[in-house]
Image: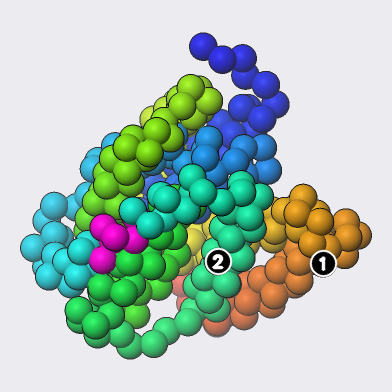
């Protein structure tokens, strides 16, 4: 068993929170784990451990009752995943780790902010959309292990109801994590450093997912999801600033302007969300009066 240094303890705390969110809303484990963990580990060490965990997590969370209603919609995505995952796995073994971190942050950050802004455009489920989307998703997942934000955006814009949304999300993620694990195995990416991270991941997942599933029944799902997005955006902004310094792209003092800009944009989006989502004062007063008379 490896020693639990500061990095491992931080990783355990992060994955526990990420598992809590995943149990609550059905996704978010990798998108909340990867950005802060990349401060301490490279994608080549981190990704294989996360993929192993996600294979089991996604199988457990799949909603079998909703699968018949969504499998035709997600089938083109599943076909597109296959070449994308192979290409992404090759990229992971070929490019310098710092540039992979940079690509991870710069791709994920706009997706998180678009989600936070409530971006909605009607998208029909079709082969014309599903195949290229699946290929790009496969590349993104095999390089970063993150696919929740773009999948959530697509399914929300297709108008899937809650059960269909969770079933479609889990079905795609079962396939992508399983195929990615196979590709990583063929590329020899399962190394001892990755295996040691499982000592932090497994207890966190076992504890966090059931707690998240229980807690979401007592929380407002939309507010909880939006707060998680803010946390994710701020962490990605910090990681982007750090990797700009690491790659000598920006001087250290100016590099943190990326984090500051991200926080400012997110605070504006969060304020807009809370002012439109929260009930008005008169509505809250009516609810209190109804509770008192009940």
Mark identifier at residue 257: 1
In this view of the protein, which residue sits in the foreground, 104 or 74?
104
- Position of residue 253 relative to residue 7, above or below, is below
Q: Confirm whether residue 168 shows in the render.
A: no
Q: Point out residue 294 in the picture as x, y percentages from the top left corner.
A: 37, 64
Q: Secondary structure at mark 1?
A: helix
Q: Point out residue 79 in the picture as x, y percentages from the top left corner.
A: 20, 64
Mark 1–mark 2 distance (CA, rounded to whole Å): 18 Å
Q: Which residue is mark 2?
A: 107
Which callout, 1 or 2, points to the residue nearer the camera?
2
**Magenta stretch bounds:** 80-85
Q: Residue furthest left?
A: 68
- Position of residue 287 relative to residue 246, above or below, is below
Picture residue at 56% right of the left edge, 31% below the top? 12
Q: Point out residue 246 in the picture as x, y percentages from the top left corner.
A: 77, 50
Q: Confirm whether residue 108 shows in the render.
A: yes
Circles 1 and 2: CB distance less than 8 Å?
no
Q: Residue furthest bottom?
A: 122
Magenta: main secondary structure equals helix
Q: Secondary structure at mark 2?
A: helix
Asked if residue 81 is among those painted magenta in the image, a careful observer would answer: yes
> Callout 2 environment at 10 Å: few (<14), some (14 to 19), or many (20+)?
few
Picture residue at 41% right of the left edge, 55% below the top? 88
Picture residue at 54% right of the left edge, 64% below the top? 108
Mark identifier at residue 80: none
Q: Point out residue 4 in the picture as x, y percentages from the top left corner.
A: 62, 19
């Amino acid at each position: 068993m490896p020693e639990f240094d500061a990095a491992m303890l931080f990783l355990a705390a992060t994955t526990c929170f990420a598992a809590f969110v995943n149990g609550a809303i059905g996704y978010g484990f990798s998108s909340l784990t990867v950005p802060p963990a990349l401060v301490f580990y490279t994608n080549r060490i981190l990704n294989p451990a996360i993929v192993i965990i996600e294979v089991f997590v996604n199988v457990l969370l799949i909603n079998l009752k909703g699968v018949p209603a969504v499998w035709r919609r997600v089938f083109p995505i599943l076909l597109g995943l296959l070449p994308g995952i192979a290409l992404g796995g090759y990229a992971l073994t070929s490019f310098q780790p710092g540039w992979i971190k940079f690509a991870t942050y710069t791709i994920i950050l706009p997706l998180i902010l678009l989600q936070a802004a409530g971006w909605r455009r009607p998208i029909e489920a079709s082969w014309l959309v599903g195949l290229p989307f699946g290929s790009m998703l496969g590349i993104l997942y095999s390089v970063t292990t993150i696919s929740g934000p773009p999948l959530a955006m697509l399914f929300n814009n297709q108008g899937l109801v809650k059960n269909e949304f969770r079933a479609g999300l889990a079905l795609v993620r079962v396939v992508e994590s399983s195929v990615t694990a196979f590709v990583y195995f063929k590329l020899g990416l399962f190394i001892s450093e990755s295996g040691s991270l499982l000592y932090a991941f497994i207890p966190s997942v076992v504890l966090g997912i059931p707690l998240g599933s229980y807690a979401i029944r007592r929380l407002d799902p939309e507010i909880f999801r939006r707060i998680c997005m803010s946390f994710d955006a701020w962490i990605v902004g910090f990681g982007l600033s750090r990797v700009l310094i690491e790659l000598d792209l920006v001087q250290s003092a100016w590099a943190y302007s990326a984090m500051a800009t991200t926080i400012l944009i997110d605070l504006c989006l969060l304020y807009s969300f809370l002012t439109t989502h929260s009930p008005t004062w008169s509505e809250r007063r009516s609810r209190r009066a109804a509770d008192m008379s009940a």
